[in-house]
Amino acid sequence: MKITANGIGMHYTLEGAEGAPVITLSHSLSTDLTMWKPQMKVLLRSYRVLRYDTRGHGGTDAPEGPYTLEKLAEDVRALLRALGIPKTHFMGISMGGMIGQVLALQAPELLRSLILCDTTSEIPEDAGPVWDDRIRTAETQGMEAHVSATIERWFTPGFQRDRPEVIAEVSAMISATKPKGYIGCAHAIRHLNVTDRLSRIRVPTLIIVGEDDPGTPVSASRTIHEKIDGSELVILKSASHLSNIEQAEAFNRSVSSFLDRIERKM
């Protein structure tokens, strides 16, 4: 389905029993809402699940950039408003986790809880040239040129070898991403720096990270954990950046346990 929110057409799906608590899922850079497929069966048992394509990705419009994380968080606020959802659990992975942090700082009243997966709160200065190079590659060669290196960062070698059908599916998502959308969002990520503000986040927070994640390593999740009072940290073994896919069963157990505990307190 598609709806106009924050001045753009946003593609989303909303599934599950009406009246159930809502959880909103926000995907990584250069994927789309289908990357959450391994979580859907478990979440739909107890929750109404809102998935959406981030600005510039999937079926959502890709206006001229650059974008900011504040703009991407405002997209979420506008989508929730347009759908009449006053409060939601929010789970974001990688870029989605960055959006979640900004959303929790901008509009904590919207959140029942926050789940931050394989993400970071700050892009160090020395990583700036890496992002400049990724942007330049998308501008000059298109998204196909990003596939191989991205897969190497996102999955362990063993998973790449054993699950070629999943690798093919994720590779197709990367290739299908609009270069304009990738570039706009990459600019937003490049300027991320919210570490010093994270102590203001008071909503219940779970942090999940793959033990072998090279892009947003365990140390980045530990920093977030230390800054957000009362947060929980789960480190998944044998998982790289897309831990929700590579270790779906362990990921789902951690998420379900956390959400169920939060709901029992409400």
Image (cartoon, rainbow, N blue to C red):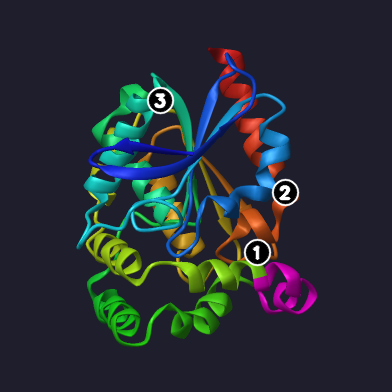
The Cα–Cα distance between marks 1 and 2, rounded to whole angstroms, is 10 Å
Callout 2: few (<14), some (14-19), or many (20+) C-alpha neighbours within 10 Å? Answer: some
Q: Is residue 158 magenta?
A: yes
Question: Label 3, on which residue?
Answer: 83
Of badges 1 and 3, nearer the viewer stands 3
Q: Is residue 130 visible?
A: yes
Three-letter code, disc 3? Leu
Labels 1 and 2 touching (C-beta < 8 A):
yes
172 sits left or right of 108 in the view: right
Q: Is residue 102 above or below residue 120?
A: above
**Mark 3 neighbour class, 10 Å CA radius: few under 14, some 14 to 19, many 20 or more:** few
- Identify residue for label 2: 250
Q: Quadrant of residue 101?
A: top left
What's the amino acid at mark 2?
Ala
Real-space CA distance between mark 3 and mark 2, rounded to the nearest whole angstrom: 31 Å
**Helix, strand or loop for disc 3:** helix
Magenta stretch prevailing secondary structure = helix
Disc 2 is placed on an element classified as helix
In the rendered structure, which segment of residues is drawn in magenta?
156-168
Along the line of sight, the residue nearer the viewer: 72 or 264:
72
Q: Position of residue 139 (x, y in %)?
A: 29, 81
Callout 1: few (<14), some (14-19), or many (20+) C-alpha neighbours within 10 Å? many
* Earlier residue among tags 1 and 2: 1
Is 253 drawn above or below residue 163 in the view shown? above
Q: Position of residue 185 (x, y in %)?
A: 31, 61
Q: Residue at x 39, y 51 (%)?
A: 60
Q: Earlier in the sequence, mark 1 or mark 3?
A: 3
Question: Residue at 29% across / 32% down in the picture?
Answer: 78
State the residue in front, 205 or 46.
46
